[in-house]
Amino acid sequence: MSTQHTIKRSTSEALFETAKTYFPGGVNSPVRAFKSVEGSPLFIKKGDGCYIWDEDDNQFIDYCCSWGPLILGHNHPAVYEKIVGALQNGASFGAPTRLENELADLILSRNPFIDKIRFTSSGTEAVMSALRLARGYTGKTKIIKFEGCYHGHSDALLVKAGSGLVTFGETSSAGVPVNVAVDTLVLPLNDLDALKQCVAEYKDQIACAIIEPIPANNGLLLQEKTFLLALREICTEEGILLFFDEVISGFRVAFSGAAELYGIAPDIVTYGKIIGGGLPVGAYGAKAQIMAQISPDGPVYQAGTLSGNPVAMAAGIAQLTECAKSGFYEEQAERTRYFVDIINTHAKANAYNFELVTIGSIFWLSFDGKKSIHKADEINPDMTGFKNIHRELLNRGVYLGPSGYEVGFVSAAHTKEILAHTASKFCEALDVIFN
Ligand SMILES: *Cc1c(COP(=O)(O)O)cnc(C)c1O
């Protein structure tokens, strides 16, 4: 095995020292802090296609892709042109623009699940607003959430499963009032019995059940389709709105997300990440009758100074135009499958306790040796394996997001040649950490 040089990190380290004097933990979002892997964060100065460069001039093939938004890779020419074109006319007006109509039309004309949409500036904001809509529309207060799903950082959703048999949750962050947490009923994923029991116990009190139909923020906890179908059925029977949080899966596994992939219609859906082409955009949507509750048509208030920002809309239009081309998602999945198969075949041949779990162009590193995991408590909490492979891959020019609970993303810029190269580096790294 060739000896690998450890990458130079001194400039990033110096920048991080300074950043720590400005920001809590030196970062503006906690997962960036490299807390669960070795070293300090790499400061990125440039991205192009599938590559990023850090401040020490190291080049990496990027599988973080800004945690999902960059499905076309960095600096895609069409997205770049469209952003610059929009920016020439001004950055923000706080008044309607044609670009909002264009992005909405691009989405709604292809999406059978929603009639109307509202743009926000982040996924968190979209989910928080849509939750208010669910409560406003149904007149009910309690919500069901599933353990292991992430829905952004609003109070009602920073809640984890409580101890014992009680289904109402405990706050998972300081500063979240207990009286907010008691209205969030937390259930295990993929568990029909628990769902039935909860729905019976809180009959006529539950506004919505929110789920990542493809849970991808805490490992990749693929749900059995039978479970999702049963969830749909129970929600319909009980007058509970089915809320698909597709901030990560929307425009990722299919244009209209997991709803399209599985053929299951949610009542409310949220988007984020890919929708903004790398700029800050979120959105929520539903059938017209539900959306009629939103201000100024209805009594549910929600607003945003920079909502529908023209530059961000332009980026979204350019990116989603590429995604809407025929065969885009099949091709993404096919290339990802090629990459995953090389690595899984190697791991299996060597009896390594490792596999990549995958759907569409998403992959997750599982060190459990379990074929498929559906629930949060099935994840092996020992992240030593991830920490080691993260280091070995960085040293071989491959960048993964710095957390073993997060998934990796393949973009349209990751060609088969790039993926084959990465797969060989991956296999090398596995050989190092397992031998
Ligand atoms: C990323 C994510 C969010 C939060 O979106 P932000 O833009 O980070 O606020 C919410 N839900 C899901 C499923 C996500 O993946």
Image (cartoon, grey):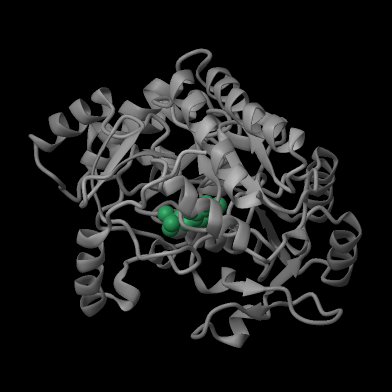
Residue 46 position within the rendered picture, expressed as x and y whole percent measured from the top left = 22, 42
Say which residue appears at 84% left-offset and 64% top-offset: 199
Is residue 143 found left or right of 34 in the rendered image?
A: right
Taking 194 as reference, is 102 above or below it?
above
Q: Quadrant of residue 340?
A: top right
Taking 30 as reference, is 134 above or below it?
above
Residue 284 position within the rendered picture, expressed as x and y whole percent measured from the top left = 49, 47
Residue 76 position within the rendered picture, expressed as x and y whole percent measured from the top left = 28, 27
The residue lying toward the viewer, choosing from 134 and 257, is 257
Residue closest to the far top = 326
The residue lying toward the viewer, choosing from 118 and 24, is 24
Say which residue appears at 48% left-offset and 32% top-offset: 422
Residue 389 position within the rendered picture, expressed as x and y whole percent measured from the top left = 54, 51
Is residue 346 found left or right of 422 in the rendered image?
A: right
Whether residue 294 can be seen here: no
Taking 266 as reference, is 128 above or below it?
below
Q: Quadrant of residue 10?
A: bottom left
Say which residue appears at 19% left-offset and 51% top-offset: 94
Say which residue appears at 67% left-offset and 66% top-offset: 382
Is residue 154 found left or right of 226 in the rendered image?
A: left
Whether residue 339 can be seen here: yes
The residue lying toward the viewer, choosing from 88 and 205, is 88
How many numbered callouts?
0
Is residue 228 found left or right of 316 in the rendered image?
A: right
Q: Quadrant of residue 73?
A: top left
